[in-house]
Image (cartoon, grey):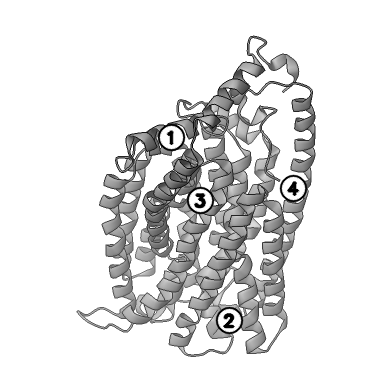
Amino acid sequence: MDSKGFDEKTSPSKHDTETGDLIAAIDPVAEKKLLRKLDLNIITLFGALYLMSFLGTDRSNIGNANLTGFSTDLGLVNNEYGAAVSVVYATYVVFEPFWTVLLKIITPKYLMTCSTLCWSALTIGTAFVKTFNQLIAVRILLGATEAAIIPCILMYITMTYNRDEYAVRNTYIFAASALSGAFGGLLAYGLTQINAAGMHGWQWMYIVEGIISFCLAPVVFFWLPNSAAEAKWLTEDERRLVALRIELNKTQYDPEEQFSWSEIWRCLKDWKLYVQSVSHFGIDTTLYCVTTFMPTIIAGLGFTSKINSQLLTVPVYFVAAVSYMIMGYFSDRLKVRSPFLLAALTSCLIGYIILAASPVVGVRFWGVFMVAIGLYVSTSLNIVWAATNHAGYFKRAFATGFVQLVGNSAGAAIGFIFTVQSAPRYLEGFYFAIGMTCMSLILTAGLSFYLRKANTKRRARIAAGAPDRPELKDKNPHFLYYP
């Protein structure tokens, strides 16, 4: 936006003075205490939701179930298992941008409670399907209802925290995702040994995990505030401090902003949206091929015992969680995203090359760990990057939902890439992952270069006296991108 677009009645010095007064009113010690309290109450709840929803849409569950008679009991033939893996994303990806936009309109408490109730019931219902057609119907509904949880968690974080606090909070959430992979393997190991009441182990796995998820719904309803400034578990002073933080963060999130189609159109005209969306498709190829097919891939390495295949997923997910917690922390501290994304994607690329090239079991298992190092760093940080660099709630909501829509389409494709016919090496799948990872590396590097150039121009405008105008959102010359 050029200089004539600024309101001459607005005094930059007055705005700067007001901002300085707000900053001075915040006690750093009290703010740290507040953040710990928010993390304990909100992020812990979100972590539990993420953990169970990650199991609920079967990113790891259906892989564990398939090792214990799932396909045989349902009479799945050819690549019907792969189709069942993929079809959940047909509705999942379509609904993601709608739920993120609706979150502020319906309110987080009601939207996320209803979503949790629905996908929990459908998870339990999966245990009672008898045919391929019934399985497909349940998974289509599962995708539509569960799609609200993960993208809306990120949006809630952007409504509550500052930009340089996003990644760390997402490391906690994605640690729960990694835990779900490990927990899913351990739980599957125990539950799939049960044969009682005329049901097999995989059915008990779905029932138990669905019931656990169902119990989270009332917790969400009674504990999650629509805004942190309304939280009953905060003191009056803490709520005032939240309000001050929100006021300082108005360029990124304005609680008073009303829905406007112009914000959606503004988002669709932003070319950066499409670069990150295509890049995220390549990134999510890594996520879904590893999380969905992890037990089967490990079994294909030569660890032929089904029990060993399930238990050996645990250290892999642990490495994935720890690597993201480290990189997410430094990403927030340094206020950059792309260097960590590039490092993570490089690690994934090396891992895929090892898996495709080496016939040695031990070496290929090391390749799985190399992929795991970049697994959650790339998947989560790319979404955080998009959320960080789009301002205005509805533009940011649609952008993050759209990026995840395109990215999660990889889940729909992956069941047809890692096919039964390509077992046990899955070479075609690994070749595809190598190509997609290279594409994401190039797009990430290119976008990072552009953002750094754009920041140089904005700093020059600030030095020339351009006023700080939060109402301009990410067109505000004082809004600097995180490269």
Q: CA–CA distance between discs 3 and 2?
A: 27 Å
Where residue 324 appears, as percent x and y from the top left, is 58, 62
Q: Earlier in the sequence, mark 3 or mark 1?
A: 3
Element type at marker 3? helix
Circles 3 and 2 in contact, beta carbons < 8 Å: no
Q: Earlier in the sequence, mark 4 or mark 3?
A: 3
Element type at marker 1? helix
In-front residue for pair 464/269: 464
Decide: few, some or many residues near mark 2? Use Cα within 10 Å; few <14, some 14-19, many ≥20: some
The image quadrant of residue 306 is bottom left
Q: Which of marks 1 and 4 is nearer the N terminus?
A: 1
Decide: few, some or many residues near mark 3? Use Cα within 10 Å; few <14, some 14-19, many ≥20: many
Q: Is residue 464 above or below residue 130?
A: above
Residue extending farthest top: 9
Asked if residue 414 shows in the view, the reply is: no
Where residue 418 appears, as percent x and y from the top left, is 58, 72
Residue 325 is tagged as none
Q: Mark 2 points at which residue?
A: 423
Circles 3 and 1 in contact, beta carbons < 8 Å: no
Element type at marker 4? helix
* Tag 4: amino acid: Ser
Q: Which residue is drawn at 52% across and 39% down?
A: 397
* Tag 3: amino acid: Val
Q: CA–CA distance between discs 1 and 4?
A: 34 Å
Q: Quadrant of the N terminus?
A: top right
Q: Which residue is drawn at 29% across and 40% down?
A: 232
Q: Name the residue under label 4.
A: 448
The image quadrant of residue 128 is bottom left
Q: Mark 3 points at which residue?
A: 93
Q: Mark 1 points at which residue?
A: 241
* Tag 2: amino acid: Ala
- Residue 165 is left or right of residue 364, and the answer is left
